[in-house]
Image (cartoon, rainbow, N blue to C red):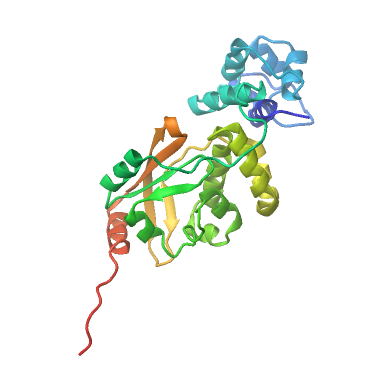
Amino acid sequence: MGTPLGDFVRAKRDSIQPEVLGLPERGRRRSPGLRRLDLADRAGISVEYLTRIEQGRDRNPSVAVVNALADALSLDPAERAHLRYLAKITGGECVAHPQPAPPRREVRPSVLETLRLLEPGLALVTNRLGDILARTGSYEAVMGGTGLLDAEVPNLTRYVFTDPRARDLFADWDTVADEQAFDLWLGPSVENSEWFTAELAPVAGADFTRRMNRHVVPARGVLRLRHPSGPELRLRRETLDITEDAQQLVVLLPADEETAGAVERLRRPPRLRAIS
């Protein structure tokens, strides 16, 4: 049985063409991407050791080996961070509780006060599982009617993979789906992620499982929303980690004047007029 670390290394190796790294073409091969021999040579390890890592038979590669693999695969900073994280959880260093459990959902008063200071902006407090733990009134007004906030505990990941309205709302649904699947690897803890994944997988289907196993590190560009009321919103995302609570404060900023105007109209409901 494989491991998240082995799956990621193998997925990255399969996605790299030898010529990109300046390696010679060695003729036809049965699978795409970089050969194990080439990757092992670049990383300074044996093919047999690389095979053990990819197949999950070696769960504790050293920091030097992890860094060598990152160099050999030409990983960008986000991918390097993900590789280090997968090496840590594969080795079992992060496991703190024997049973998976749902995460804490309390938001500290000081964080709630910070959120209030961001009104009338669009902002929310979330965790890596996608739980929306708190939000500004403006965020609630703009997202009303999308179905995202209908649940007692709204969850963006569950909404993306199980609510048909999500595919209409997110203009770049595939990218958003990759983002939400990737974030499950990051917490708030390994146990929470296992609990949530086990809960979501039966209802989200094979597409969710496939994205979890691909380990695609998302670029997180401009978020495009096709709002039910008509306008397309283009929003930049600024994310601040609340490390102590394994939560995040996310602020959504209009990326252009058209979006700014549309957001202003959405968060200000039309005034009622008296009919004489």
Q: In this view, does 14 lie above or below 133?
A: above
The quadrant holding residue 243 is top left
State the count of labels: 0
Q: Is residue 140 left or right of residue 96?
A: left
Q: Position of residue 53 (x, y in %)?
A: 72, 20
Instruction: Identify which residue, 140 or 195, lies in the foreground.
Output: 195
Q: Residue furthest left?
A: 276
Q: Residue 186 appears at what percent x and percent y?
A: 54, 33
Q: In which quarter of the image is the N terminus?
A: top right
Q: Quadrant of residue 265?
A: bottom left
Residue under the point 75% across and 29% down: 2
The extreme bottom residue here reads: 276
> Of residues 25 and 271, which is closer to you in this image?
271
- Residue 225: quarter of image: bottom left
Q: Residue visible at 78% across and 14% down?
A: 48
- Whether 132 is drawn above or below 60: the answer is below
The quadrant of the image that shows the C terminus is bottom left
109 sits to left or right of 42 = left
Q: Looking at the picture, how far across and down is residue 58, in whole percent?
A: 73, 18
Point out residue 218 in the picture as x, y percentages from the top left corner: 52, 38
Q: In this view, does 227 lie above or below 56?
A: below
In this view, the residue in front, 52 or 149, is: 149
